[in-house]
């Protein structure tokens, strides 16, 4: 499950101090039992196996410095009561285990839907397994929503404590603690109200509005009327405080550039798939946990930036229709895998997926024949190998594989003739050996090329040996086959030259042979 310290710092702090949770051990039936015997926390990795993605005690120190009241016992007790439901849910998820791969969830949902519609005859046992996968995913989704709600609830409890209210009598949810935030929202909207109204008025008067840039305006809400600005080609609302984008945005038929970075978005509207002329989409640095499946309908998309979010997967079919996509940034997320459809992005030139949790790449990854720049660095303990098809990336020029757990480059790596920049730092590589890696990219290419040729030669020898009977492999048998072959060639040539001069030419040919 999603580690909480990055996205739910207060909740993580409180849960780590609940004695009944901090002492939980894996059960005998748990997959982790006997693997190390340490504390198991679905919110964060065990203490004895620190991860570069897990905030250190410095992050906790910053939180307590910002919210010193967290140290007060009465505040902590009130917060503990406020998240009792989270405690129970965490215990249940420890039994259920991790969530399934997104592609497996999608296929399971499709099978269940087809069965309910009477369109398939899947065996009941398989159907029940699919239902179990869907139920597990729904449980994890519900828990994730619970975490978000609990984080907000804790902020209200803390605010009430700092205002001197009696926490024992404070109703759940914080009650009046919302008033200051609401007033702040109104003030933030008022600051840009006139500018927004001016844009909409100009559009309503029929005047051309092709570009709207409301960057860094403390904007908390984007009016639905923006979806009716016909002819709008560029909309930039970066660095604001937007939490949602209205569905009405799907009405911008001519929109080519949409910039939403550095906001507080938790989701993109499904209607984004209606933007068939969209070429540039920047949704970086938000709070996105998933992308709508409809995003695959943005067939004109050339550049897509979804970095610095909390994405755990990409839509299953994202690659089948985004055939014009050239640049894809998905770094600084929590991606465990890339869907196999990514391999269909025939125009993809750049792929940046560093600092995720990738366990590998699709087997057909080599189909990305246009790929020139690839960054898979800092997937740490998760990325251990590359697919055999990796050597088919014949146009690859820059590759960063640093900070992973790759033990050997694929044998086909030697085919990457155009590779100019290569970073293999912080990998336990055995193939190629360290002395070769230290000499640079050319030495690595030469070593892997020779290794590739040796493998091909060895495979050819095995093929010949398999096709040749064991009895005919002796020197005598080989000589008999050679003489027979020469005689056959001699006879064929003599026949071709004609019968009248057979004796003379046959003697000459035999002499030459």
Image: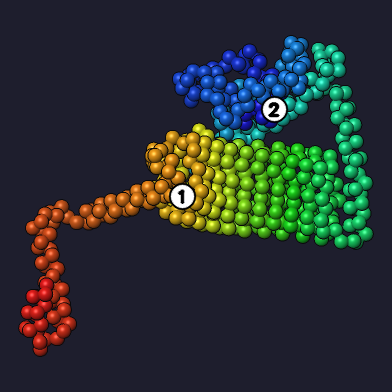
- The answer to whether residue 482 is seen in the rendering is yes
Residue 492, percent from left and from top: 16, 77
At x 13% / y 80%, what residue is drawn? 494
Could you say which disc has been placed on residue 279 in the image?
A: none
Badge 2 element:
loop
Residue 148, percent from left and from top: 72, 30
In the image: residue 428, left or right of residue 62: left
Residue designated by label 1: 390
**For residue 14, above or below residue 466:** above
In the picture, the quarter occupied by the C terminus is bottom left
In the image: residue 240, left or right of residue 29: right
- Structure colour scheme: rainbow
Within 10 Å of disc 1 (Cα), the crowding (few <14, some 14-19, many 20+) is many
- The answer to whether residue 383 is seen in the rendering is no
At x 74% / y 16%, what residue is drawn? 70
At x 6% / y 83%, what residue is drawn? 503
Residue designated by label 2: 8
């Amino acid at each position: 499950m999603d580690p909480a310290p990055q996205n739910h710092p207060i909740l993580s702090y409180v849960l780590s101090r609940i004695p009944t949770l901090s002492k939980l051990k894996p059960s005998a039936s748990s997959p982790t039992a006997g693997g190390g015997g340490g504390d198991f926390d679905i919110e964060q990795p065990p203490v004895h196996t620190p991860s570069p993605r897990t905030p250190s005690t410095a992050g906790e120190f910053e939180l307590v410095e910002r919210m010193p009241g967290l140290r007060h016992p009465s505040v902590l007790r009130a917060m503990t009561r406020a998240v009792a439901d989270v405690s129970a849910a965490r215990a249940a998820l420890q039994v259920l285990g991790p969530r399934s791969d997104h592609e497996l969830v999608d296929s399971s949902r499709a099978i269940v839907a087809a069965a309910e519609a009477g369109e398939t005859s899947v065996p009941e046992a398989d159907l029940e397994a699919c239902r179990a996968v869907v139920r597990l995913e729904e449980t994890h989704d519900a828990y994730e929503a619970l975490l978000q709600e609990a984080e907000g609830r804790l902020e209200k409890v803390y605010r009430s404590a700092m205002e001197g209210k009696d926490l024992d009598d404070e109703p759940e949810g914080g009650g009046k603690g919302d008033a200051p935030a609401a007033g702040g929202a109104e003030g933030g909207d008022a600051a840009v109200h006139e500018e927004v109204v001016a844009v909409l008025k100009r559009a309503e008067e029929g005047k051309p509005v092709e570009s709207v840039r409301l960057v860094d305006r403390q904007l908390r809400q984007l009016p639905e009327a923006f979806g009716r600005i016909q002819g709008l080609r560029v909309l930039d609302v970066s660095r604001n405080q937007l939490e949602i984008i209205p569905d009405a945005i799907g009405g911008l038929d001519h929109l080519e550039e949409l910039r939403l970075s550095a906001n507080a978005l938790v989701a993109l509207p499904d209607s984004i798939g209606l933007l068939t002329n969209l070429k540039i989409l920047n949704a970086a640095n938000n709070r996105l946990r998933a992308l709508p499946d409809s995003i695959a309908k943005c067939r004109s998309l050339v550049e897509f930036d979804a970095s610095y979010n909390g994405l755990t997967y990409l839509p299953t079919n994202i690659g089948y229709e985004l055939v014009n996509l050239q640049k894809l940034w998905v770094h600084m997320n929590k991606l465990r895998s890339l869907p196999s459809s990514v391999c269909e992005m025939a125009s993809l030139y750049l792929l940046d997926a560093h600092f995720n949790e990738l366990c590998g790449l699709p087997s057909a990854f080599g189909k990305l024949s246009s790929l020139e720049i690839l960054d898979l660095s800092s997937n740490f303990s998760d990325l251990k190998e590359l697919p055999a098809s990796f050597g088919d990336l014949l146009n690859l020029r820059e590759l960063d594989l640093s900070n992973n757990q790759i033990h050997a480059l694929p044998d086909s790596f030697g085919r990457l003739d155009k590779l100019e920049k290569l970073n293999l730092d912080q990998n336990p590589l055995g193939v190629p050996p360290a002395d070769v890696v230290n000499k640079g990219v050319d030495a690595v290419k030469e070593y892997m090329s020779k290794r590739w040729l040796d493998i091909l030669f060895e495979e050819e020898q095995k093929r010949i040996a398999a096709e040749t009977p064991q009895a005919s492999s002796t020197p005598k048998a080989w000589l008999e086959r050679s003489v027979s072959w020469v005689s056959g060639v001699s006879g064929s040539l003599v026949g071709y030259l004609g019968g009248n001069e057979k004796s003379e030419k046959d003697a000459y040919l035999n002499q030459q042979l």
